[in-house]
Image: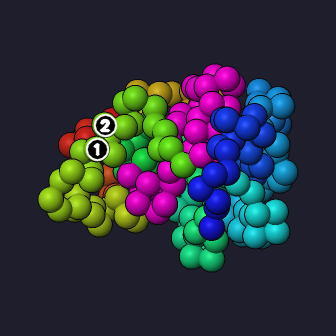
Amino acid sequence: MEDENTATFAESGTPPRVVIVDDHRLFRSGVRGELGDAVDVIGEAGDVDSAVQVIAEKQPDLVLLDVHLPGGGGSEVLRRVLSRHPEIRFLALSVSDAAEDVIGVVRGGARGYVTKTISGRELADAIVRVADGDAVFSPRLAGFVLDAFSATDAPPMDPELDRLTQREREVLRLIARGYAYKECAKELFISVKTVETHVSSVLRKLQLSNRHELSRWATARKLV
C-alpha cells in the first residue's frame, strides 16, 4: 500500500513507468517519440499473451492499452493482469470511439480512455493523471461512461454483435459510416485485402448480402 505522504507523479516530477500495448510496432514507436521524457517507457507488447508477460515482468505504474489486440483484445489483458496485480493502472488508447468499446474496457478495470487523435502533450498529461489515480476520458467518451453506469440496468447484450471479433466490429462501423475499403485500411493500419476479408466475414456472420444492408444493420443498432 502506498504511503499517504508519498508525492504524486505530478507533484514529484518523476515520470511514471509505462508499458505500451498495441499491435502496430510503428505506432508504438510513434507514441514513444511523442511522449519523450514525460514518461519512462519500460516495455512494449503487440498481443494479449506478450502483454500479460511483459506487464508481469516489468510491473509498470501504468499500461497504455489498445482495445483491439490479437488474442482476445484489451479486455482480456485487463482480466488476466488485474486479477493478480490490481495496483497497476490502465489507460486505453484506441482509434475506436464506439460506446461498447469504451464501456467494455472501463468495466474491465481501465481508469481512462482516449482516442488516437490526442496530441502527445495531452497523452502525457493523461498518463500522469491516471497513474496518480484520476479517471481521464476524451469529452465525448465520458458521456458514454456516465450513461452506462447511471443506468439502473446494464445495456442488453446483442447476440448478433457478439458473433463478431473486435476487429470485425471496427471495420463494420467504418464501412457503415461510408468509408471506402482503402480509407478503412488507412484508418486501421491494415491492408485493403484484410478489410475485404473482414467485411466478407461480417456479412456471412450477420447473414447480410451487401454493404448497404450492413449500414442499415449498424444504424439500427446505433453503432455509427
* 109 in magenta: yes
- Main secondary structure found in the magenta portion: helix
Q: Is 117 located above or below residue 80 in the figure?
A: above
Give the residue at mark 2. 143
| Amino acid found under the numbered disc labelled 2 | Gly
Figure quadrant of residue 95: top right
Q: Is residue 89 left or right of residue 56?
A: left
Figure quadrant of residue 45: bottom right
Q: How many marks?
A: 2
Residue found at x 24% / y 45%: 147
Residue farthest toward the left in the current orientation of the protein = 152
Residue neighbourhood size for the residue with mark 1, other residues' Cα within 10 Å, grouped as few (<14), some (14–19), many (≥20): few
Q: Position of residue 185 (x, y in %)?
A: 62, 34
Q: Which residues are magenta?
A: 103-132
Q: Is 133 located above or below residue 87 in the figure?
A: above
Do the residues under discs 2 and 1 have CB atoms within 8 angstroms? Answer: yes
Q: Is residue 159 left or right of residue 198?
A: left
Find numbered disc 2 in the image and state the secondary structure of the residue it sits on.
Answer: helix
Q: Is residue 219 left or right of residue 187?
A: left
Residue found at x 27% / y 63%: 157
Q: Is 98 located above or below residue 54 in the figure?
A: above
Residue 22 can be seen, yes or no? no
* 142 in magenta: no
Depth check: give the residue in front, 102 or 36: 36
